[in-house]
Image: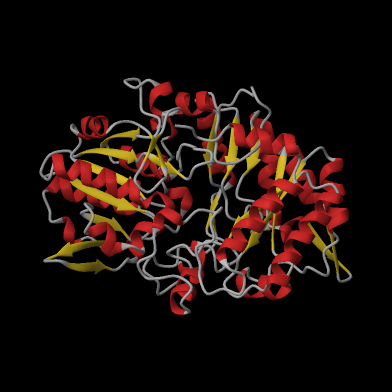
Amino acid sequence: MTKDPRFLLLYPRNQTIKGYMCKPNGSLAYPNIGGALLARGVEVSVFDACVGNEKDDLQEVFYRSTELPSGLLRTGVSDERIVEEASAADVVGLTSIFTSQETMVLDAAQLIKAQYPEKLVIAGGVNARHRLQKFLTGGVDLVFLSEADLSVMQLADALRRGDNWRSLAGIAFLDNGKVIVNPVTPETLVTDLDALPLPAWHLLPNDRYWTIGRPHGGHFEPGTPLRYASMMTSMGCVFSCSYCHISREKAGQVSGNIGRFRIKSDERVAEELRVLKGLGVKQVFVEDDTLFGMKRRGIELLRKIRGHGLEVLDVNGVNVTHLVRNAGGTFMPDEDVIQALVEAGFREVVLGFESASQRVIQKYASNKWRVDALDVESLLKALKDRGLTVSGNYMLGYPDETREELEGTIAMAARHRALGLDWANFLCVMPLPGTLIFEWAIRDGHLPADFNPDLMNWTLATMTNTPVPAEEVERRRFEAWTQLNDPAMVAQRNAMNVTL
């Protein structure tokens, strides 16, 4: 290829289990990649096959789903529309962050390759890079092994010159049926976040997202007008929890050391906020894995956001340890952090408690908070006194979790509700590819090597040979969710579920 390549970044159709709310993807992958390509002068567009574009009737493509042979519900445009949108592109990019959507990603790749075998189909994301054989034999020509902002610009340059892209660093591809891995190099790793091109949020079908009003986080009153977008002010994390992809994003791993904590400057964050405001955005979801990885920096950053006239919402969960300070061995509310959240416009805080067992917290969650030393009552009171809505996340079904430990977590959530927690979210532990817990699950016989990615959902317990059987974990998760939360809120969430 010796011409300027045209890129299409395609979100695949969505598949959901019955009784689960369908939400568009809309992740930051494509604004970031799109911004990088635009900075190189490359023609790029985004098509979200879950919601379609102006050619598609939203009522038909999003609000009516098709049952798949797997029993899951597929939401999105027809096969023909995917092929049509891909027709003008030379390169089609597919993001595979979420293992539960792997089938839909590969379905799109195979549709495009069947019709246009000459097109270059590329993929990235934590799931893709840890499922290379599956992707490279499933219609994908090239998989990026790390954050692709820099690598995709190098690919575009190579295609323009007519060079062989197979020589690029930080990619994997097939050669005579064998997976070839070109390791990441310092030149392909993102270190200076300020040096990256601005995300191209305008490429997303924002009006459709806002009409649907189902962001992947947050809780809103019915009828609340939404004009939201996501951003990140930092990358990586100061923790390394076994159920998170960051646990396998270290030096020596396939991705390189991208799990390390990196920050954008205050000036860069302010510039991004100005762009979002110019697009008509009203609510910003801060997607940082650890917004307070550097606590003073986080506080000052939030104070500077205040003047931009945007509501700031956190969806990844604020680490409990960052909201407290050590007061003689007891962890009490950190008033400076809480005040900074309020001043920045936060309306909700999600507390990641994960487990009531210190053993579990230590083994699986970086030992990041002390169950016996945190004054939860004071923390909840401090948050709610400032008008914040507070929910908690609790995880059930760790590989070696005992029944006593599981029930202890549910009991802890009940105590938190009695102390003023607005609602409790219960999630089954997911051993996702690209995490340390996945490797443990395979090693210890809790997950077969040919596991079904369609079952990787937070409502499903996928591991076997565990002290608490999978069916019991699922039953207790559902019972805890419905019994400990307000019936009106449960009914509201259920009313938004996908239908045929």
Residue 1 seen = yes
Image quadrant in which the N terminus is located: top left
Q: Which picture quadrant has residue 215? A: top right
Residue 250, percent from left and from top: 46, 70
Residue 98 seen = no
Q: Is residue 5 left or right of residue 255?
A: left
Give the answer, above or below, for where 385 lies relative to 247. above
Q: Residue at x 34, y 61 (%)?
A: 129
Q: Nearer the viewer, residue 397 or 69?
A: 69
Color scheme of the displayed model: secondary structure
Q: Nearer the viewer, residue 411 or 213?
A: 411
Give the answer, above or below, for where 149 lies relative to 78. below
Q: Residue at x 35, y 65 (%)?
A: 186
Give the answer, above or below, for where 170 lies relative to 41. below
Q: Nearer the viewer, residue 53 or 63?
A: 63
Task: Please count the marks in the image.
Answer: 0
Residue 493, percent from left and from top: 63, 36
Image quadrant in which the C terminus is located: top left
Residue 476, percent from left and from top: 66, 58
Q: Which picture quadrant has residue 256? A: bottom left
Q: Is residue 119 left or right of residue 75?
A: left
Q: Residue at x 17, y 56 (%)?
A: 165
